[in-house]
Each structure stands twice: as C-alpha cells, then as structure tokens.
Amino acid sequence: MKIALGPLQYYWPRVTTLEFYAAVRDWPVDIVYLGETVCSRRHELRLPDWIEVADMLAEAGKTPVLSTQVLLESGNDLNTLRKITENERYCVEANDMGAVQQMRGRLPAAGPSQGGDGPLGGRQAAGAAGGPSFVAGPFLNIYSKPTLDVIAGQGAIRWVMPLEMGRAGLAQLQRDRPAGLQTEVFAYGRMPLAFSARCFTARNRNFPKDNCQYVCMDHPDGLLLETKESQAFLTINGIQTQSALVYTLIHALDELRGLGVDVVRLSPQSQHMDQVVTAFRAVLDGRETADEAHRRLVPLMPAGPCNGYWHGRAGLDMVLAGEVVVSQAPDARTPGVKARSAA
C-alpha cells in the first residue's frame, strides 16, 4: 500500500507551510495532496504557489495531486476550480460534483485499464494522453455501487472512502468496484465532518466572516469545542467542523491490505507529522507492530485517538483488540483556548 499525505486542512503562515512541504520531500510518502480545500479567504499560498510546491515534490519523486475546494461560494471560487481542473500537469482531487463535471471526459475512450504500475495506478497512461485524471474525494459521499460506477464512468482513477464508512461497507464496495479503480482510505488525523457557509472560528471571536481577521491562523490544529459540561465535542476550523479526537487506523492496516486498499491517507498536523508518517511506514513494511506504533503515536497526537466508525460504532469510540477503551479527552492533552459552545 502507498501512503498519501492529505491536503492541509488548517491555515498556517506562508513560511511555515513552505517549510513543511520542503521537509515532506524526505518523508516516506508516495502521494501528496496540495491546495486549499476549506476556505478561499486563506490565501497565504495561491494556485501558482501550490504549483511550485507540486513541482518541487515531483522532482523529489512524489506524486502531487491538486485538491479542489469543498464548498464553492463565489464566482472567484469557481474560477479557481476551473484553473485547477484545466491544468495539464497534475492529477486533481475532485471534492464536489462541479469539479467532477469539469474533469469529465478528460480520459480517452479506451477505458480504465490502460496498464502501467505508476503512482496513479492502471489509468496513469490514459490520464497522460487525455489530460490530468482525477481522484474522487471523500466528500462526494460514495456509499453504493451505482454511485461508484457513475464516478468511475466520469474518469476517476481512484476514490476516497467517506470517513463515516466502516469496514463492512468498504468490503462490499471493494467487491463491487469497477476494474482498474483504486481505493484510498483516510487513516490518520482529525476527521473533517461538515462544511458550512458560516465561519465558526470568526464567530467565536465576534468577527463577521467577511472581516474574519484570519483568526484561523491562531489555531494550527483547529479550535476545540466543548459542551457546557466541559466535554470535548468537536474541533472548529473556519467553516469546517472536525472531530475532537484523532482518527487512526494504525491497527487496521493489515485489514485494509486484505481488502485490496491501494492508498492510506494521513492528514497533516502542526507537530510531529514526520514521525506519524514514519510510524505508518514501519507498520506497512513489517518493521514494527501496530501496537508498538500506536504507543509511539499517541503522545504525538494533538488529541486522544478514536476509530469507532471503522468498527461500526460511534465515531469517538476507540476499539483495541475488540474492546472499546476510553480515549483521553483532548483538553487534558492540549492546553489553550477553548471555544464557547451553544449546546
């Protein structure tokens, strides 16, 4: 299985972001997703900058993928989407159906099985012939065979499993998926659960969205939201709502391999991301057990671990050896500002 570094979900300063991706050149990752997927007001890096980062990573032997914004709210957002999907150099991650329609028909009619075993899999040659191919992102909500067939028919080379899907649902879709279509699974990070037209981080500081003062930059791993009972509930990240806990499938890598999963996705965090990648690589290569890697990972997380969705349980559950264990509350691990909750 290959390791993919997912798109950066948070708003970091320009220098921090560039230094992060310069370091990625030496990490044992195969695929790197690049671009702003959350909010168009985040413009420390613009599309030409992301292209330069992609060029740098490609020279280092990585496979860059340009990710599109999930929630489009303006004509400028649509123009940026078009520029991304019209690029002739890099694969695109389509995060809404508008992006899928923009990418439609860019593969030649020869079909999904064009051979080759490059980083993009069997459709790499076809993508090169007909323009960049695309990955169906996790926000397209692909839960059934008919939907998967439609997306594959639009020219997707890979699909990313929705975060709420468990192993039973994935197993069924793996049996039903079209030939030549790869599967990617989100395997580490705070889970992006929902998007809204409102900016919750700005609202927490009593700023309007259009004059947000870019306060997302004050929270490099998002802003913890608690209930009135001081229980960790969610993480707010601008217009995006995330899980409070950190999703990890480090114990499920053998299962994922057995199900025929091609790529596991690790979502960037502000600290220790190189060690997170190394831990997953060590387990995939058989140099470390999942238990050993998990013990090494937990102190590196910005919050406690969870994996409930994978086991068909509540998302905040952590299941180890078939038993539910209690995850450590994020506020006990991460001191700092907590958001007010209206709950």
Image (cartoon, grey):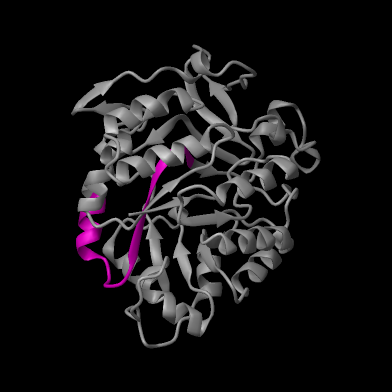
User: Would you say residue 340 sits in the magenta stretch?
Assistant: no
* Quadrant showing the N terminus: bottom left
- Find residue 56 and report its image quarter: bottom right
Residue 163: image x %, image y %? 39, 45
Q: Position of residue 150 (x, y in %)?
A: 36, 71
Q: Is residue 136 above or below residue 337?
A: below
Quadrant of res 126: bottom left
Of residue 295 and residue 133, the one placed in the foreground of this image is 295
Is 185 placed left or right of 25 in the picture? Answer: left
25 and 129: which is toward the camera? 25
- Residue at position x 37%, y 41% from top? 280
Residue at coordinates 44% horizontally, 17% vertically from top-left?
A: 329
Q: Nearer the viewer, residue 27 or 329?
A: 27
Q: Please report the residue visible at 71 percent of the width from the left and 30 percent of the height from the top.
A: 218
Figure quadrant of residue 341 = top right
Q: Which residues are magenta?
A: 169-192
Furthest-bottom residue in view?
A: 109
Q: Please indicate, yes or no, whether residue 283 appears anywhere in the rendered image.
A: yes
User: Would you say 112 lies left or right of 198 here?
Assistant: left
Q: Decide whether residue 176 is among the magenta residues.
A: yes
Q: Position of residue 326 (x, y in %)?
A: 32, 18
